[in-house]
Image (cartoon, rainbow, N blue to C red):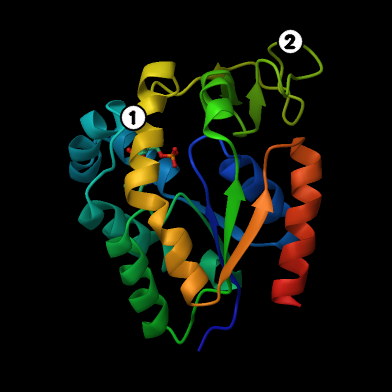
Amino acid sequence: MNTSPVLILLGPPGAGKGTQARMLEKQFGLVQLSTGDLLRAAVAAGTPAGQAADAVMKAGALVSDQIVIDILRDRIAGADCAKGVILDGFPRTAVQAAALDELLAENGQKIDAAISLEVDDAAMVERVAGRYTCGGCGEGYHDSFKVPAQDGVCDGCGGTKMKRRTDDNAETVSGRLAAYHTQTAPLISYYEDNGALQRIDAMGEINVISIALSAAINKIIA
Ligand code: AMP
């Protein structure tokens, strides 16, 4: 039986799941599991799953449950995940939520908390369309909300290769928000019903949200 923490970050694209998960990873010694990152790696590697996911991701729709569940199942079995995980972008459908419960139960585990980052839709397009990451270390930046100290140079690793996701454009973001509302938002009541839901106001400054999130997690895993 594994008693290490399993946390889920829920929220629409642009809510800050990736940014916050990276900070929590460092702070709590957990592993961030982002199905978006895993899928992008599969696309880049040209695996069969990546080839099937590529066009779907470009269109801003959800990749099939089977592909995502398989990818997650493989990754969560990694030895490093034994210290605990923060799921970022998974589950995104009721089928994925049920599969996750089953997967964890096989290992004597369950979800410690599903944390919903609560934001206004109207702000999300601007948040997503302006973001980019360092190609070297993955640190996230934003044209307006989080610029590096020196233009084009990563504060974390000094790298100068900044990357923008091809699906981070205003058109695709609208589709991704719609997918969130129809397929993922119902999971909020699913986790509320089983007592795992925590809500965090995620409209403010990144550091303020991070403090609220850390405080909530400290209580959960204490
Ligand atoms: P993200 O990096 O979480 O914003 O995900 C980027 C894209 O990957 C999404 O728009 C989906 O096309 C796909 N994706 C990531 N996670 C999932 C998931 N759990 N279920 C289905 N599709 C996903």
The residue type indicated by label 1 comes to Gly
Q: Quadrant of residue 130?
A: top right
Q: Residue at x 37, y 18 (%)?
A: 171
Residue 206 rendering spot, x and y as whole percentages: 74, 37
**Could you tell me residue 22's position as x and y percent?**
64, 46
Question: Is 150 above or below relative to 43?
Answer: above
- For the residue pair 189 and 91, the one nearer the viewer reads as 189
Q: Quadrant of the C terminus?
A: bottom right
Q: Residue 133's spot in the image, x, y percent?
A: 58, 26
> Residue 33 vs residue 27: left or right?
left
Say above or below: 169 vs 84: above
* Residue labelled with disc 1: 175
Report the side of 187 relative to 140 (left or right).
left
The residue that label 2 is drawn on is 151
**Residue occupying the point 35% across, 36% down:** 178
Q: Amino acid at mark 2?
A: Asp
101 over 144 or under it: above or below: below
Instruction: Return the x and y of residue 115 as percentages of the image width and height.
Output: 59, 59
Residue occupying image coordinates x 33% and y 40% = 179
